[in-house]
Amino acid sequence: MAGRVAGKKAFVTGAAQGLGAAIAWALAEEGAKVALADVNFVGAEKLAAEINQAHGANTAAAYELDVTDEEQWKRALEAANAAMGGISALVNNAGISGGRGNIEELELDNFRRVMSVNVDSVFLGAKHALKYMRENQPGSIVNISSIAGLIASHNTPAYNASKAAVWLLSKNIALHCAKQKLDIRSNSIHPTFIDTPILDPLRQVFGKDEAEAKLSRQVPLGRIGKPEDIAAAALYLVSDESGFMTGAEIKVDGGISAM
Ligand code: NAD
């Protein structure tokens, strides 16, 4: 089958909706098999059925996975490896924004929860997927950080800290793989505000139009991003087109970090 990622076997977390779903669609459209892992198993199953309808049976399958749970990671990866006949790409996308509140307000439990979902996930995913990926080279690990991992704001301590951790953990994984002489790359993507359900809490506070206008005013290109904007970057990183790129970060932020 032709396609930019034909023959790739990709494991995507948080794939039931939002960026994960858009990334899964983009990979499937370009010839990859996709394992859709999410704590929302029903949502992942629904998407798998839609992708299979569009791109043929066995293009996609759903796996129940809470990315903070090591045993679930082992089970889901083993099952996806068996079903797809290998794993050559891991997209660590699942993440939460967590409660707002400045450093004096945010509860420790909340901080730990955000760190666990956003960072333990990348650690566990890479730790356990490499066993399969080393058998399916060339491979690519794509970690969805955020522009908030590079630029702080005053009231998102957990999100800032967690996404900064994802940024450097991606480089650590890249150097480990290179040192092991594996043709497995690891890079991070740093989106700004993208139109997904993660923005719903803000929409509830200000109303949809005002919330999106508020966010758009902060972006030099004058709009929030589309999930496809991020899927395009992920597709490039999963494909062999980015074969000499590892330990790098791609900012897809409408210019916000240029200011
Ligand atoms: P979303 O809330 O629309 O989707 C997140 C998905 O992750 C959901 O399907 C959810 O069920 C799943 N998920 C949540 N916790 C999980 C867990 N413990 N285990 C497994 N799955 C879990 O969010 P999104 O906007 O698509 O965000 C995806 C990634 O992109 C996140 O890492 C987020 O931080 C990052 N990001 C998003 C934006 C944005 O504005 N949308 C900007 C920068 C970075």
Image: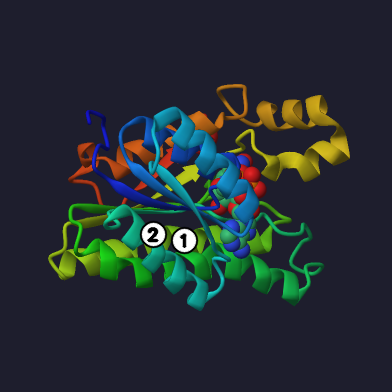
Is residue 163 visible from the viewing direction of this image? yes
Q: Which mark is residue 166?
A: 1
Q: Earlier along the polypeptide chain: callout 1 or callout 2?
A: 2
Question: Based on the displayed image, in which of its 4 quarters is residue 160 positioned?
Answer: bottom right
Instruction: List x then y, in percent, for residue 45.
Output: 57, 48
Q: Which mark is residue 80?
A: 2
Question: Based on the displayed image, in which of its 4 quarters is residue 170 positioned?
Answer: bottom left
* Quarter of the image where the N terminus is located: top left
Residue at 50 percent of width and 60 percent of height: 164
Front one among 254 and 64: 64
Is residue 253 visible from the viewing direction of this image? no
Instruction: List x then y, in percent, for residue 142.
Output: 38, 51
In this rendering, would 153 be left or right of 31?
Answer: right
In this rendering, would 140 be left or right of 15?
Answer: left
Above or below: residue 90 compared with residue 194: below
Residue at 71 percent of width and 55 percent of height: 154
Q: Are marks 1 and 2 in contact (CB under 8 Å)?
A: no
Question: Residue reaching furthest front?
Answer: 57
